[in-house]
Amino acid sequence: YDTPPCSGSEYFEVPLITPLIAGETYYVSFFVSLANASKYAVDKIGAYFSVDTLQSLGNDTCYFPVIPQTESASSTFLSDTLNWMPITGAFVANGGEKFLTIGNFHPWNNTNTSIVSGTYLGAYYYFDDVCVSSDSLECFNTVSVKEFINNEEKTLIRIVDFFGRETEDKPNTLLFFIYSNGTTEKVFRLE
């Protein structure tokens, strides 16, 4: 069985605008997309809310050994590289949580994996449109990324590369076109 080496998991961690309130129900939604280069897809990606940054725990293992408050359903592999896959959930806060961390909180031997066509020895995901709210309509009553239609006129205001650096339009490179109406397009032209 071909499994990735234990070189550590990567996580997306951000501070919350305000700490969560004890006993309050919070709704969480975000979208993920598997990077084309990934050799593996996993079935578990979750969101963990904490009082302190998880970096303060240290990471002597290959993952942060915490139980996420919300997690993707483990019946489906998150293997789509073309579309954004939604992950949603709800939980009751303990109170005082100030950080949100997103990732896979399970060791590889406890994570179902599926081999896909990439060459990167791991599962690497992009994240988008993260929502945390005590109002369920705010996170769950929105149209999906695929369904969003914005009829406003738009003009290209910036082109950035994968690392967020401003660049010019060029072929054979993944670029992000940012428009005046707030929309963004991923563009890759072959030449």
Image (cartoon, rainbow, N blue to C red):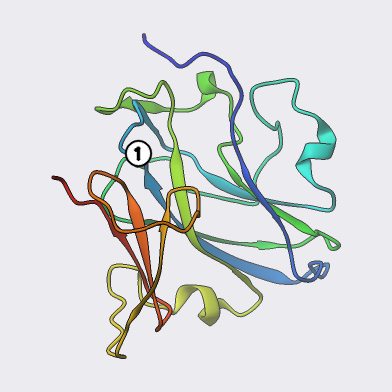
Quadrant of image for the N terminus? top left
* Residue 123 image position (x, y, % from top left): 43, 31
- Percent across and percent down for residue 79 are 31, 40
Q: Quadrant of the C terminus?
A: top left
Q: Is residue 146 left or right of residue 85?
A: left
Q: Is residue 92 above or below residue 67?
A: below
Does residue 94 appear in the picture of this structure?
yes
Return the x and y of residue 133 as percentages of the image width and height: 63, 73
Label 1 neighbour load within 10 Å: few <14, some 14-19, many 20+? some
In terms of image quadrants, where is residue 149?
bottom left
Q: Residue at x 47, y 73 (%)?
A: 140
Q: Which residue in the structure is indicated by mark 1? A: 77
Residue 14: quadrant of the picture: bottom right
Q: Residue furthest left?
A: 191
Q: Residue at x 58, y 24 (%)?
A: 107
Q: Secondary structure at mark 1?
A: loop
Residue kind at label 1, given as amino acid type = Phe
Q: Is residue 73 visible?
A: no
